[in-house]
Amino acid sequence: MLDPESTAVEGLITMSVPVVHDVIIIGGGVVGVTLARTLSRFELDVVLLERDAEVGFGVSKANSGIIHSGIHADPDTVKGRLEWPGNVGWLRLRDDLGFGLAQVGELLVALAEDELATVEALHAQGRRKGVPGLEPYRQDQVRRAQPNLTREVIAGLWAPTAGVVNPYEAVLLIADNAARNGVQVVTSEPVVGIDPPVVDEPDAPIRVRTPGRTWHGRYVVNAAGLYADEIAAMAGVASFTIHGRKGEEYLLDKRLAGLVTSIIFPCPTETSKGTLVTPTYDGTIMVGPTAEATDDKDDTTTTPEGAAQVFAAARRLVPGISPRDVIAEFAGVRAVAHTEDFIIGPTDRPGFVNAAGIQSPGLTAAPAIAELLLDVLSDEGLALHEKDAWQPRSEHPVRFAQLSTEEQAELAVREPRYAQLVCRCELVTEAEILDAIDRGARTLDGLKFRTRIGMGRCQGGFCTWHCMQLLAERQQVDLPAVTKRGAGSWLVCERDDAGARPTAALGG
Amino acid sequence: MTISAEPRHLDARYDVLVVGAGPAGMAAAIGAREMGADSVLLVDRERDPGGILLQCIHSGFGLHAFKEEITGPEYAERFFEQVLDHEVDVLTDAFVMDVTAERRVKLMSPSVGVTTVDAGAVVLAMGARERTRGAIHIPGDRPSGVMTAGLAQKMVNLEGYLPGRRAVILGSGDIGLIMARRLTLEGVEVVGVFELLAHPSGLGRNIVQCLEDFDIPLHLSTTVVGIHGRDRLERLTVAPVDDQRQPLMDRAWDVDCDTLLLSIGLIPDAELARDLGARMDPLTGGPMVSSTMETSLPGVFAAGNVVHVNDLADWVSQEARVAGEAAGALSTGRMRPLEDIRLLPGDNVGYVVPHTISSDHTQTVSFRVRKPIYGDTQLRLGEVHRRKLKAAVPAEMITIKVGPHLLEGFTGDALRVDAVPFDAEADAPSDAVGGER
């Protein structure tokens, strides 16, 4: 992919003195980008390296999209300590960046007498962590709040602080803001090696190798998700293993909007918070996830068994749910450390810091993880001087469909491409697509998660070609170079006689 | 194709505004002008009028409308010449965002910005969209290379690219069959067509001309049960199904391919009608209409695939002409026919359009059977009309003309349409005059 900065970077390699970055972040998931934005408050040279074609393409975009209320994780664990402050941090991020986040609250329900103790225990745990607004519900209160729940519910716990977020939109806007504040975000840049420490030079920067070049960093933060154990091993500090735990999610038709208006939790089991029924930020209902151990960290298949399990569990809570209403399905693989807790902190190698094993509630905790990492880096000697010019807000991308007719008309006068339709189902215009490309979209999926193209009823049947053309034109590549999500996910190929075509001969 | 009639500016009001310039919208615009509408605006979201006809470069169009076999683009061009001859204003690259019950139309286009136009009558002619992977819930990976047959048709026929090198087609709808042939001609290997049902969904002539003539296997009662490939599609798992359409996994097998085209049905693209609050028919997915194709909202008409999915473009144009003529007549103050009889789908009938008919005039009634009858078939319109057909299959739409003479003496308020195997004793021939296409 063409990166406007790549030529400048190439030029620097030839210089005899390499650029030494203050911090190299490995991994552009929610943890990496949130840390990048946090570090962008300071006078630091920060680079983020992401193996995928765009940030957030791993489990950060394939999860339940829930900002947990704060009651669930045990406060004697790292993840339990960071859950509630993370929740609070998300509201600040939302206020700064304007992505979709709604505090819809959660309702934990008990279906049997023996679950009442769990409800009480979580209530006590939440109070101990300082989560406000918790309220035990009697059966009739549950019924009034969520009339479509099963009549089997005998009691519940209301936690108003839980929210739903579009995780992909949030990750992209956080990364966008970090980039605007000077962080260099480099995608399609997988880390393939980390050089051992230089003997007799303890202060020498850590050398991080990618296929095309070597990056030099005074500090390296390992936020590599599922592969954090491999990155740590490259750095010579293998002290943990990461295992995949797959979660399948099923999105239901908009027809069911309003079936539940808060996140519905069953009582949790040993390994999982259970299957949830979630009203997403966009107004659809989502059910899931499963929690299935997988040896293959890239296995994001959905399965008939997963679907059966999700729907059996969801129908126990909300009988009106049916697999017939599925409009889309996906799966993400959570990065679970062998300790079942977050691994955040310095290592035996000076300057190399882990942010690993970020399983649930990792999305919720991300802002607090970033603050914790800031402390860790500071303790390790990173000097933090606040920037005068830090811009916490960035201009939110225009969402044409959500504007008033007057605003739409005014925009169209200013820029006629706002009146050029691309996606009819979600009403996305050409100007929005071009803006998304300028903000870093490189693939069809990248456009989809930024602008909602292809998420509607026709699932891209009508607008895919138009989007491919805009991606090709703006990046000055041929159409066969345009991909769904990078790597080998090509979309079209040349005809066998294409060599005879003048356009190909001219190189576009 | 050039658009000489494209308005430089829009009038604030038109007698008739037609949404969509495919085979339905163009015919409706012509019909409206012929029945006396002074000003007609035809709006389309693409750069060129013609709708999906433009990518249908195969022949098989026009047998009824022009009495000769032509291609989709030729069919579009002939209609568009008539549109221009009839002095219809045409606005392309324009998207209708909203229509109100008062027929105030909000639209956007780079040439006119975001603006509103008032219309005496509106004809909705947005056509249909293809069902997608989400609608049929196939487990597995989500690689590139899985797309609707119509998108592949656009890539190949309009843009000159191939969707892949080795393709499987799921569903035996007409677009899929036509793409099986097109891809073969373009040098793409088509491994086979898989159909969940025990009978093909597309027209018989397409089974012969697109599959049999090219030795492409058609696997009936078989479907795709798994999609494999991290980045690009690499392999499918397919399995036969039992008579409850449940896959028999012990008999599943794998097929290597890089492309899966979905031809699993069309759905009326009727969101404007739904948003307007028009009464919808759950059987068709489109709005309910009267004998003149008027929806439940006065002055708002609908015709073509936005009402029900037709098998041929020619029928679409014929039906839309009725709608356009009625919209034009309404704009000149003529009265509506009395709609006094409801039509109901009966035995083995999937849906019936229109939803009401009138004893004032002759109208065309269209429907499809649910299950195929490969033999003499009795069509019944209540007790007033019977007709024998040689066969009736879901792929082919059936139409009958119903005139005042048939309804003379009928005093009920509803008629059932049935299509059942012919029973010589019970089904004595009726002497009523009608005619199926």
Image (cartoon, coloured by chain):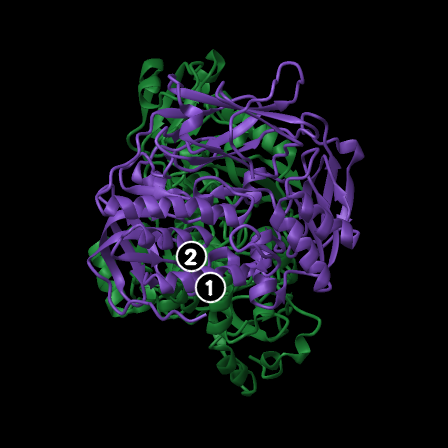
For the residue pair B143 and A85, the one nearer the viewer reads as: B143
Residue found at x 36% / y 36%: A162
Residue found at x 36% / y 68%: A180
Relative to B252, say whether B418 is above or below.
above
Mark on residue A450? 2
Is mark 2 in CB contact (under 8 Å) with mark 1?
A: yes
Q: Position of residue A297 (x, y in %)?
A: 64, 48
Write down the chain letter for disc 1.
A
Amino acid at dot 2: Arg
SS class of the residue under badge 1? Answer: loop
Q: Position of residue B335 (x, y in %)?
A: 25, 38
Q: Which chain did the renderer colour purple?
A: B
Q: Position of residue A462 (x, y in %)?
A: 48, 55
What residue sits right under mark 1 in the picture? A441
For the residue pair A508 and B310, the one nearer the viewer reads as: B310
Write down the chain letter for disc 2.
A
